[in-house]
Amino acid sequence: MSLDTLRSSIEDKDHAIITLIAERMSIVEDIAREKERQGLPVRIPDQANAVLDRATTESNNLGLDPAPIREIFQILVRMSEEFQEQWREKKE
């Protein structure tokens, strides 16, 4: 395969990753509503740790270095929590 073809394939994967992040954030809005309905805080450390642990396990299962994958998921968790906080502030 040519370098251009390989780069195009990476671009496709990058687009897919961004699309999945957008879909994830859409679900986060539903989570924000449900947490508010149940009177739960935005930040639930046990849940955040469960997400990070799943990411670590999955990356190990796929033969990837878990450290950078964990960092990516820490960012995703932070994005989710920040979104939920902003969502609540808009409602007030």
Image: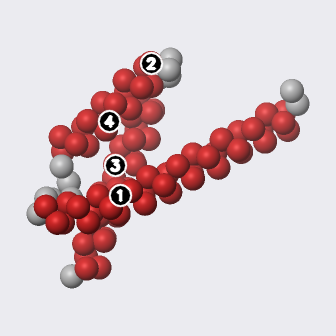
Residue 67 falls left or right of residue 2: left
How far across and how far down the image is residue 70, in percent? 39, 34
Give the Cα separation between the discs numbered 1 and 3: 10 Å
Residue pictured at 34% horizontal, 49% vertical: 77
Q: Are marks 4 and 2 in contact (CB under 8 Å)?
A: no
Q: Earlier in the sequence, mark 4 or mark 1?
A: 1
Label 4, label 3: how far apart the Cα atoms are: 8 Å
Q: Is residue 82 visible?
A: no
Q: Which residue is rendered at x = 39% and y = 41% of the image?
A: 73
User: Which label belongs to residue 77?
Assistant: 3
Alpha-carbon distance for marks 2 and 3?
A: 21 Å
Q: Nearer the viewer, mark 4 or mark 2?
A: 2
> Which circle's residue, 4 or 3, is located before the other in the chain?
4
Q: Which mark is residue 61?
A: 2
Element marked by disc 3: helix
Task: Label 1: state its secondary structure.
Answer: helix
From the top left corner, tell me how far across and down residue 19 is, in percent: 57, 53
Q: Residue at x 44, y 18 (%)?
A: 61
Identify whether 26 is placed above or below 11: below
Whichever of labels 2 and 1 marks the residue nearer the N terminus, that label is 1
User: Mark 4 belongs to which amino acid?
Assistant: Leu
- Residue 74 image point, x, y percent: 36, 43
Q: Amino acid at mark 2?
A: Asn
Three-letter amino acid code of the residue under disc 3: Val
Q: Is residue 75 visible?
A: yes
Marks 1, 3: nearer the viewer = 1
- The residue wearing badge 1 is 28
Q: Is residue 58 left or right of residue 15?
A: left
Query: Contact (CB < 8 A) between labels 2 and 1?
Result: no
**What distance separates the C-alpha of mark 4 from that of mark 1?**
16 Å
